Image: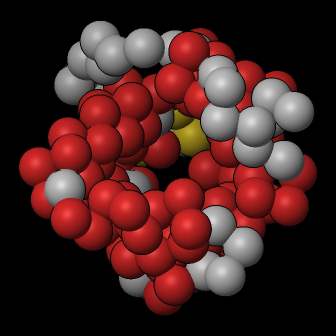
Amino acid sequence: MNTSLGQKLGTVTLYERLGGYPGIRRIVDGTVAAHMQNPTIKDRFLPYLDQPDRVEEIKQHTCMFFSQGSGGPQSYEGRSMTEIHSGMEIDDAEYDAAVDDIVTTMQALGYDTETREDVLVILKSLKADIIHV
């Protein structure tokens, strides 16, 4: 994980600017809903509609990952991004669609440009760990 994710901007961490765990959870919930509607990636997510427990598990792991990476107190103990996405054959278009869903969700939730851009930097730093075609 990128160690600069939790660096402070002034005296406020990215975690705090995201609204702590509840704010991160809102972003994750909104993003998953957006993924289900996004024509580029929805086929990867729609099969999970019949697995609400699995969706909740994925959301929890995602929240923990972003909490730890943004300077929060939660600890992520899941698999690496490379391990999670290995064999999925995610291409650039799918990656870009997922990132767009995250940033668009953040904008809809009222996050400022600077915070969205900081998250975008994080997401771009993870690209090489996610794209495997």
Of residues 116 and 46, which is closer to you in this image? Answer: 46
The answer to whether residue 21 is above or below residue 34 is: above
Give the residue drawn at x 64%, y 22%.
86
User: Picture coordinates of residue 85 (x, y %)?
Assistant: 60, 29
Q: Quadrant of residue 60?
A: top left
The answer to whether residue 130 is above or below residue 23 is: above
User: Picture coordinates of residue 69 (x, y %)?
Assistant: 46, 27
Q: In screen coordinates, is 127 left or right of 33?
A: right
The answer to whether residue 35 is seen in the rendering is yes
Of residues 94 and 15, which is closer to you in this image? Answer: 94
Give the residue drawn at x 15%, y 59%.
52
Q: Quadrant of residue 18?
A: bottom left
Q: In screen coordinates, is 52 left or right of 38?
A: left
Q: Quadrant of the N terminus?
A: top right
Q: Quadrant of residue 71?
A: top left
Of residues 41 and 16, which is closer to you in this image? Answer: 41
The answer to whether residue 125 is seen in the rendering is no
Q: Quadrant of the C terminus?
A: top right
User: Picture coordinates of residue 93 (x, y %)?
Assistant: 85, 61
Q: In screen coordinates, is 34 left or right of 19?
A: right
User: Picture coordinates of residue 87 (x, y %)?
Assistant: 66, 26
